[in-house]
Image (cartoon, grey):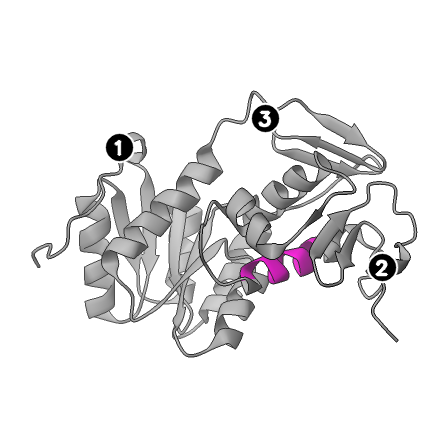
Amino acid sequence: MMSIADPVAPAGDLAGRSVLVVEDDDTVAEVATTYLRAAGFLVDRAADGREALERVAELSPDLVVLDLMLPDVDGIETCRRIREQRDTPVLMLTARTSADDRISGLEAGADDYVTKPFSPRELVLRVQSVLRRTLAEPASEDPVSIGRFFVDPAARIARMDGRDLSLTVREFDLLAFLVRRPQQAFDRETLLQSVWGWTYGDLSTVTVHVRRLREKIEPDTANPRHLVTVWGVGYRFQPSGEAPHEQDRPAP
């Protein structure tokens, strides 16, 4: 067993939560597993996508750390299949040099990503951050009914025109944040900090989640009426789907 070179933040209230590490590189898997166990998590491993899907069905882990490049079934497809079956949060491991890989992982339903080569301590902190947000008790937030939307943060229920919306953890958090602040424009930095809790990070994370949320609430994603782009600023939520204001339209 390898020794821990860097201090690891203890899981604290997350001690005993289960994490499935899906990685075909034995060295990377061993490092991730060792650090996560040292932080207090219960960790299982899988070496490929097919085994990962079997282990998720069998173990129902609280979070999956998923490598992008896997034999048999790759990480993107594995993430999609997990999302079709359950709301288990997924933290994707991606190549540092490929922005497309990161975006593809987010579009497939990943809640966060860590780039390779990665700091094991950062991996632990990201796992803790995703789990705390996923398991947070938002009971103090009352349900909101506005326009075509109903969102109950405590029950994690979101509806549009009375129809349940199937949202990932981050998609739900983004929608819940916006419905409580209709007609307000937010830049991506503010959304990254308010919804993800990050003071820094890749702003494409916000862009991808906005795109995914639009696919679920907009009849025409090319001409959004609810989650509109405020050019030069960011995004604004319009609960009734009124036509965008003139300043929201791109310059001719």
Secondary structure under the numbered disc 1 in the rendered image: helix
Residue 12: numbered disc: 1
Q: Is residue 8 above or below residue 48?
A: above
Residue 154: numbered disc: 3
For badge 2, the amino acid type reads Gln
Q: For the magenta stretch, what is the residue range? A: 205-213
159 relative to 127 in the view: left or right: right
Q: Could you say where residue 160 lies in the image, as x and y percent from the top left?
A: 80, 40
Disc 2 or 3, which lies upstream in sequence? Answer: 3
Name the front one of labels 2 and 3. Answer: 2
* Res 111 seen here: yes
Q: CA distance from mark 1 to mark 3?
A: 23 Å
For badge 3, the amino acid type reads Ala
For disc 3, the neighbor class at 10 Å (few under 14, some 14 to 19, many from 20) is some
Q: Residue drawn at (31%, 35%), measured in percent from left and top?
A: 14
For badge 1, the amino acid type reads Gly
Q: Is residue 12 above or below residue 168?
A: above
Q: Which residue is mark 2?
A: 247
For disc 2, the neighbor class at 10 Å (few under 14, some 14 to 19, many from 20) is few
